[in-house]
Amino acid sequence: MKGILDRGLEATLDLWLPVRTAFAWVHQAAHMLGLEDTPGTVIRAKLGGLLGAMRRHRKAAGDLAKGVDHFVKVSRSYWPGLFACYDTPDLPRTNNDLEQAFGRHRYHERRATGRKGASPSLVLRGSARLVAGLATRRQKVTAADLAGANPAQWKQLRAALEERRQRRVERTRFRRDPEGYLKDLEIKLNKLSLPA
């Protein structure tokens, strides 16, 4: 049996070299992205160098050159947001971590409201509620933290949330009584066009 395997590996040796090369590159990239306590600028520089080397030496990957090109292209497309987790403490590094954070929020939301599905208000106010929920799970929020908030930003966020809520209310009014809703719009339009 060992003789058969040795002959098979020997016969396909030239097919394994590109696989080893491409695997080594991808493994090295994964190792770089998995570094702990390393600034994003250092990881950015290392990964940029590796991607440049992969692009220059892509022929060493043989038939896998298209796969190497795709890896480099996708890595470059994620480049702007790829390193934020290294510069921001407690920011989840992977999609799995983010999905777990959202899942925990949904779980607590369901427990608090008694709903089986997601709360509709999460869609409307998710940009504020989700951030607040995640922040309060990380650390205790005190009155001093809330007092330090920027009132202008707070008012701007409240206005944006209220605008979204009003659009949702108007959609439900139209669904309940389309003719009445259109008639009200027509009356408002006529009032605007009449001279005062």
Image: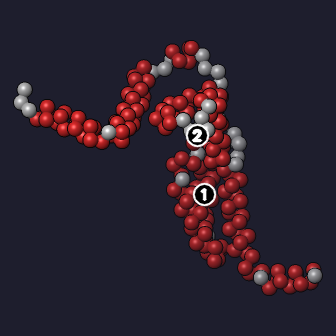
Residues 47 and 120: in front is 120
Q: Which mark is residue 196?
A: none
Question: Which one is nearer the viewer's eye here, 48 or 69?
Answer: 69
- Marks 2/1 in contact by CB < 8 Å: the verdict is no
Residue at which label 2 appears: 117
* Residue beneath disc 1: 49
Q: Is residue 58 above or below residue 192?
A: below
Identify the residue at image location x=86%, y=85%: 7
Please give the name of the residue rendered at 60% of the width and 57% of the height, measured from the top-left corner: 49
Q: Position of residue 126 (x, y in %)?
A: 51, 35
Q: Position of residue 187 (x, y in %)?
A: 18, 34
Seen at 83% across and 83% down, the residue is 8
Helix, strand or loop for disc 1: helix
Do we see residue 39 in this rendering?
no
Residue at (61% x, 67% y) in the render: 68
Q: Position of residue 77 (x, y in %)?
A: 51, 56
Q: Amino acid at mark 1?
A: Gly
Is 132 situated left or right of 104 in this image? Answer: left
Quadrant occupied by the N terminus? bottom right
Q: Nearer the viewer, residue 143 or 167?
A: 167
Give the class, few, some or many, for how many residues have Cα within 10 Å of label 1's Cα (few <14, many ≥20).
Answer: few
Picture quarter with the C terminus: top left
Crowd around label 2: few <14 · some 14–19 · many ≥20 (10 Å): few
Please state which amino acid type lies under the numbered disc 2: Gly
Please identify the quarter of the rendering in which residue 111 is found: top right
Give the alpha-carbon distance from disc 2 to disc 1, as whole Å: 46 Å
Q: Earlier in the sequence, mark 2 or mark 1?
A: 1
